[in-house]
Amino acid sequence: MIILLSPHFYRQKVLEFKLLFVFLQPKVVNRVLHIMANIVNYVLHIVPMDVNCFLRIVGFDIGIMDRLFERHDIYLSEVPMDYIRDFMHRIHWDSRLIIVKGPKGVGKSTLLLQYIKKNFEADDRHVLYCSADTNYFATHTIVDLADTFVKRGGQWLFIDEVHKYEGWSREMKEVYDLYPKLHIVLSGSSLIQINDGQADLSRRMLHYEMPGLSFREFLKLDVGLDIESITLDVLLESPNKFCSHVRSLCHPLEHFSRYLKYGYYPFYFESKRSYYNHLEDVVNYIVDVELTKHRSIDVGNTRSLKALLQVISQMTPYEVDIAKLSKATGISRPSTLKYLTHMEEASLIRRLFTDLKRVTDLQKPDKIYLDNSNLLYALCPQQPEIGTVRESFFANQLASAGHTVEYAGYKSGDFRIDAGTMIEVGGEDKGFSQLEGQGHAFVAADDIEFASMRKIPLWAFGFLY
């Protein structure tokens, strides 16, 4: 303790003073810090020491925390509150540890900030939002942040882009165990890194996967139409009632084709002209950075992966021929199957199987789509095949609404939903021949506004969330 009484020693021996505590148990360190704080209060009139300097030595970096709160305030002041996605209500916010994951650009950061702004006062210092890609984490750990925040009375800690912090899951496990009264909310865009980290926190963390905009949400943001979502069961039971309601408010087909091209990612409303460029940047980042770093894919093979995506974007929605796919891209069959698995994990594609319960790691999928129709239009070198667009939209919207989507089989329809409902997707003239003999079966038809018997407009399946 005598070193506190010597300004010269304080200036010259700061590093040694810090290292002294590395070998002490946390309880011992806390006791020592308490004693030191009392000593400083007593001797400040003897030694002219800045209190913040002392606090910084013993782990209470007040200046840095204040800067984090300043950024927190700036983020909150800029977040729009005119539209809040219903996804917010799916989350059990009172849980101690939550992670919101999803593809880059679907609005996770906005969602977290909106929740804070909606539920906390502007100057409430019991809550803190920060991003893991800030300079703070170049010299501090997540444990440091949690420790300092809790000691200042913190109760809710929101960390965005957590995947950019190496070893985040291990430290989160430690924070979870050390601070039982602290609520932690995380978000991450790298689905691959998040999936890798979840194993460390499997019994502690609730995870939610945030999709892009539904057709219903796009209509709200694009033309201001606020229409309630509908469950799949209600839609299938009374399709004409729902379609007539929507039709009384707008011509859905007037907006549907625009959604298929531009409506899935919210950043469309930030810069419409550069939308596809932004979308291609997202794809390039996933392939060039995430897959090479976290799935050990050689950098020299990234061009082959992008070629594989282009080939998939040009495929007609028939059963997959892996041999032809491998030949078209110059990738071996085993590598092709492995790459498809990784790209689905990163939400670039969607694989369908006839029986999900029996799927193996390198099993050939029965159908392959890009994850959503916007990716299809962005990556296809020419106008994409309309049948592929329709089926990509349908599979995306059903899966995003939480339904299990499987391939129904060549003679049974395009999709089997939740292991029981068969649905064939097509144009307005699509018939029921492929659904013959199926008990609970429907046609999702494009280019129609009203339902007729078991033929339901395709766009109506965009109102499920």
Image (cartoon, helix red, strand yellow):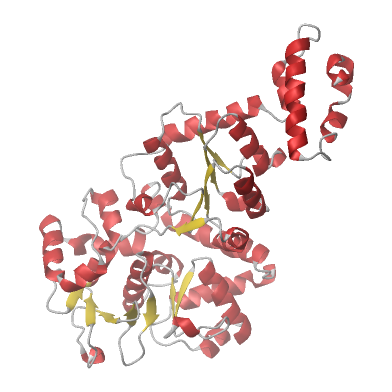
Residue shown at the point (34%, 50%) measured from the top left: 85
Where the N terminus falls, by quadrant? Answer: top right
Instruction: Provide residue 241's location: percent of width, then percent of height.
Output: 11, 66
Residue shown at the point (62%, 39%) measured from the top left: 146
114 w.r.t. 288: above or below: above
Instruction: Provide residue 24's location: percent of width, then percent of height.
Output: 81, 38
5 w.r.t. 297: above or below: above
285 w.r.t. 409: above or below: above
Q: In this view, does 436 lie to the left or right of 329?
A: left
In-front residue for pair 118/257 = 118
325 w.r.t. 257: above or below: below
Q: How many labels does the image show?
A: 0
- Looking at this view, name the residue that lies furthest to the top: 45
Instruction: Provide residue 179's location: percent of width, then percent of height.
Output: 60, 42
Q: Is residue 296 left or right of residue 67?
A: right
In-front residue for pair 406/376 = 406
The answer to whether residue 273 is visible is no
Where the C terminus falls, by quadrant? Answer: bottom left
Q: In this view, does 86 lie to the left or right of 340?
A: left
Instruction: Provide residue 28's location: percent of width, then percent of height.
Output: 77, 35
Residue shown at the point (67%, 63%) measured from the top left: 293
The answer to whether residue 59 is visible is yes
Residue shown at the point (42%, 88%) measured from the top left: 319
In-front residue for pair 141/29 = 29
